[in-house]
Amino acid sequence: MTDHVLALDVGGTKIAAGLVDSRGEVLRRAVRPTPAHDAELAWQAVADLVAEVLDGTVPGAVGIGSAGPVDSDAGTVSPININGWQAFPLRDRVQALLPGAPVSLAGDGLCIALGEHWLGAGRGSRFMVGMVVSTGVGGGLVLDGKPFGGRTGNAGHIGHVVAEPDGWPCTCGGRGCVETVAGGPNMVRWARAQGWSGADAIALADSARAGDPVASAAFERCGQAVGLSIAAAAAICDLDLAVIGGGISKTGDLLFDPIRRTLKVHAGLSFLRGLRVVKAERDDSGLVGAAALVLL
């Protein structure tokens, strides 16, 4: 294997590619919006990014983190937010572009957790969940210092823990998932239903900081839903750390204060008293984690 690997981070909002060295340094990167409503355009975006980032470099291996569900054995992905990518053979399609390089595929949440565990806020933790709270809510697990994908590669889908049993329908087919409460567009949707008239999640955060009661309640609901999911995951997996990234995490205490209040109430078991919740250190943990699939 050469010292350089290709990393891909395929999400419903954006697709990123990077050339990464053995230390986890991203030497070159490129990002494009995901053409989420056209399956072939979405694939073409992946292929174009690969060509742009490699620019003639031959990688020793390829690591892919993709929105899911994924089928790690078959190498297929079925992202909820990319129309037409149902059992899409992403691993084989990338392999055809680079026939000499082995290709590994995992869920993007797992890659985010692995990236933070390797070179971010999760360094030194043995049992952690990595989360993204943004347009949606995703996650992945590192257990006993190793990435844990579970039976199909989908362990750690913490955004689809149920937070409100009678809540809104979710794009996953369930109801009341954490994502229906804590995903940015759903926070805005809820706030508007309560009379708030702002444009987006950024404006919602500004309103909350200014003391708007509806905006503040939207962040309280978000933090409570995320906190409940962390408490559940921690109790099941005996976690010592939760690392949270994504756009909503950039609001700081608006998100983290209600999370920590929720954990004080709902994470009462003695072995959970040392559970910490911290902000992710890296904006590129998905890429770094995808590279780690083949580097570590």
Image (cartoon, helix red, strand yellow):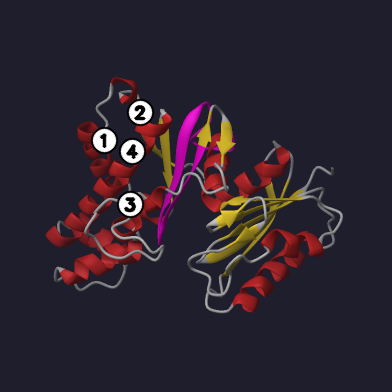
Q: Residue at x 69, y 66 (%)?
A: 49
Using the image, tell me which numbered label, if any, was put on residue 251: 3
Residue at mark 1: 263
User: Which mark is first along the chain, 4 or 3?
Assistant: 4
The amino acid sitting under disc 4 is Ala
| Quarter the C terminus occupies | top right
Local packing at callout 3 (Cα closer than 10 Å; few below 14, some 14-19, many 20+) is some
Q: Secondary structure at mark 4?
A: helix
The amino acid sitting under disc 3 is Thr
User: Which mark is first along the chain, 2 or 4?
Assistant: 4
- Give left or right: position of 37 versus 289: left
| Residue 215, percent from left and from top | 19, 60
Question: Residue 202 versus residue 241: which sits nearer the camera?
Answer: 241
Residue at mark 2: 275
Q: Disc 4 to disc 2, how far (Cα)? A: 12 Å
Local packing at callout 1 (Cα closer than 10 Å; few below 14, some 14-19, many 20+) is many
Using the image, tell me which numbered label, if any, was put on residue 245: none
Question: Residue 37 versus residue 244: which sits nearer the camera?
Answer: 37
Q: Nearer the viewer, mark 2 or mark 3?
A: 2
Q: Residue at x 29, y 42 (%)?
A: 227
Q: Secondary structure at mark 1?
A: helix
Q: Secondary structure at mark 2?
A: loop
Please identify the quarter of the rendering in which residue 240 is found: top left
Do the residues under discs 1 and 2 have CB atoms within 8 angstroms? yes
Do the residues under discs 4 and 1 have CB atoms within 8 angstroms? no
- Give left or right: position of 252 versus 92: left
Q: Is residue 198 above or below residue 23?
A: below
Question: Bounds of the magenta span?
Answer: 118-141
Q: Secondary structure at mark 3?
A: helix
The amino acid sitting under disc 2 is Leu
Residue 239 is at least partly visible in this image:
no
Using the image, tell me which numbered label, if any, was put on residue 232: 4
